[in-house]
């Protein structure tokens, strides 16, 4: 049997403790699968005395994760610290430069520094594995990086944040407000004390930028993503979507167009009969559209200690199965130096159209003024109806518009015009509609 694979775990929070526990509890099974033992030989965390529910006393303790990353006592550095700078970046860079394999769950780090880190890994001939960074326990990275050779990807999209999906699911199922759902998500541990990173779309954007690089062979461009979160979704939107035959989901979408790559994160109305609409709670789902395979949908647990630990250990097992002299594949499916510069697509028409909710003064001429603003911006309307909402003041009404294919710019310009006309009593709502998916 080959020598044991020695791993060092940096960060012993929920995920780190789960990784250590599974490596202990499943040691015999992992040895049979990998042909060698996997042992935790070193750990690094803030508080050595904290009870984490797993005994790591046999491992060497490092106060500084960078020193652990450089230590000759480990073969694999597992980074579970988090953050795109500081100890996370410094320790991963140090491990790669020292010729250590790296496994990370850090999407923020990869979104900002992934290409540079990939260049170091490929130069040193070591692996940089990151399955846990996108969609938790769903093996989407391995699928795109290894199992889709020869396929040209045209679009990748999905539900990439369990917190947002949990909130939207409960809003629809129980008729409760966004704020009430968020408080419950925080109480249950699905949302952070400061939930901004999740609910405003940043987490989804980081994950999407990684998938975009894998799908299209471009450098990661997390700053070139149109991003809108779910904090302004109301029960009025949820009910109107249901009446129209749709369900609201926060989607991350990346697709190739004639002018470049389009990346966007925003609430989306999807048909209630579609597969993606059936993904509820904290579950994640990723759809990949290709020329050979067609459409592939992967779904499963997208967050939590066990789901993320499962992905981390899968990456470690891949390293354990490799042998000295084995030529590792490139980190992002293509050599990092050959990744093309990201070219942002030009604004184009959205085939699914838009849902627009306007709360307006109940007075003569408002409908006509709204219709004129739409016509002035070459927007064709599929429907324009008054949508009664209980509790509305008698002096105001809600108007629901559904457009045919048009551009984001045209819709925003029309809505801005309606706002300037003084017809609105509340902030307007604009949501893209996907006819299929």
Image (spheres, rainbow, N blue to C red):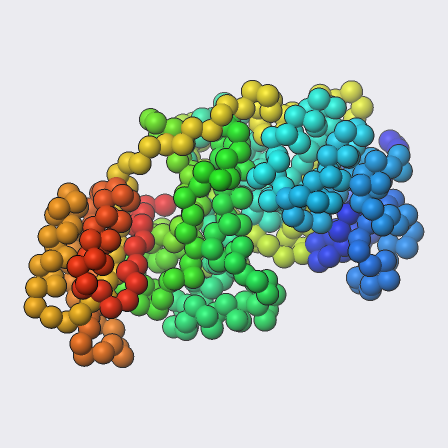
Q: Residue shown at 33%/32% (left/top)? A: 346
Instruction: Classify the position of the N terminus by image quarter.
Output: top right
Q: Residue shown at 82%/59% (left/top)? A: 47
Query: Can you say whether 404 is above or below 333 in the image?
Result: below
Q: Does the rendering let one see residue 159?
A: yes
Foreground residue among 291 and 109: 109
Please state if 168 lies on the left or on the right of 54 as rendered: left
- Residue 6 x, y percent position in the rendering: 85, 39
Q: Residue shown at 27%/79% (left/top)? A: 391
Query: Can you say whether 306 is above or below 106 in the image?
Result: below
Foreground residue among 66 and 128: 66
Q: Does the rendering let one see residue 22?
A: no
Please state if 116 lies on the left or on the right of 386 as rendered: right
Query: Can you say whether 222 is above or below 383 in the image?
Result: above
- Residue 268 x, y percent position in the rendering: 36, 52
- Residue 370 x, y percent position in the rendering: 14, 57
The tally of labels here is 0
Instruction: Classify the position of the C terminus by image quarter.
Output: top left
């Amino acid at each position: 049997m080959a020598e044991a694979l020695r791993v060092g775990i940096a960060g012993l929070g929920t995920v780190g403790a789960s990784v250590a526990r599974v490596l202990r509890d499943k040691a015999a099974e992992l040895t049979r699968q990998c042909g060698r033992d996997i042992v935790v030989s070193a750990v690094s965390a803030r508080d050595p005395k904290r009870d984490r529910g797993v005994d790591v006393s046999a491992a060497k303790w490092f106060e500084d994760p960078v020193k652990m990353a450089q230590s000759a006592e480990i073969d694999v550095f597992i980074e579970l610290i988090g953050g795109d700078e500081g100890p996370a970046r410094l320790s991963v860079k140090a491990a790669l430069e020292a010729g250590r394999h790296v496994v990370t769950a850090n999407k923020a780090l990869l979104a900002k520094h992934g290409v540079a880190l990939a260049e170091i890994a490929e130069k040193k001939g070591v692996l940089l594995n990151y399955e846990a960074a996108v969609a938790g326990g769903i093996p989407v990275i391995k699928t795109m990086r290894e199992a889709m050779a020869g396929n040209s990807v045209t679009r990748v999209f999905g539900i990439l944040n369990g917190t947002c999906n949990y909130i939207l699911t409960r809003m629809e199922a129980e008729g409760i407000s966004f704020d009430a759902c968020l408080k419950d998500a925080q109480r249950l541990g699905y949302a952070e004390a400061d939930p901004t990173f999740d609910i405003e779309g940043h987490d989804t954007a980081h994950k999407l930028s990684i998938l975009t690089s894998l799908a299209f062979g471009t450098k990661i461009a997390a700053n070139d993503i149109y991003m809108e979160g779910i904090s302004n979704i109301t029960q009025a939107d949820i009910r109107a979507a249901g009446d129209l035959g749709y369900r609201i989901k926060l989607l991350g979408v990346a697709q190739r167009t004639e002018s470049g790559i389009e990346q966007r994160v925003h609430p989306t109305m999807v048909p209630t009969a579609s597969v993606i609409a059936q993904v509820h709670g904290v579950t994640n789902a990723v759809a990949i559209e290709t020329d050979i395979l067609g459409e592939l949908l992967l779904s499963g647990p997208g967050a939590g200690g066990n789901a993320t630990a499962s992905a981390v250990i899968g990456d470690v097992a891949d390293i354990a199965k490799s042998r000295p002299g084995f030529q590792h594949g490139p980190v992002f499916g293509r050599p990092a130096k050959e990744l093309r510069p990201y070219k942002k697509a030009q604004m184009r028409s959205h085939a699914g159209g838009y849902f627009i909710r306007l709360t307006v003064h109940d007075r003569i001429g408002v409908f006509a003024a709204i219709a004129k603003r739409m016509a002035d911006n070459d927007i064709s309307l599929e429907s324009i109806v008054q949508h009664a909402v209980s509790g509305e003041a008698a002096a105001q009404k809600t108007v629901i518009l559904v457009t045919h294919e048009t551009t984001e710019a045209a819709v925003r310009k029309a809505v801005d015009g309606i706002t300037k006309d003084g017809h609105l009593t509340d902030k307007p709502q604009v949501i893209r509609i996907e006819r299929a998916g």
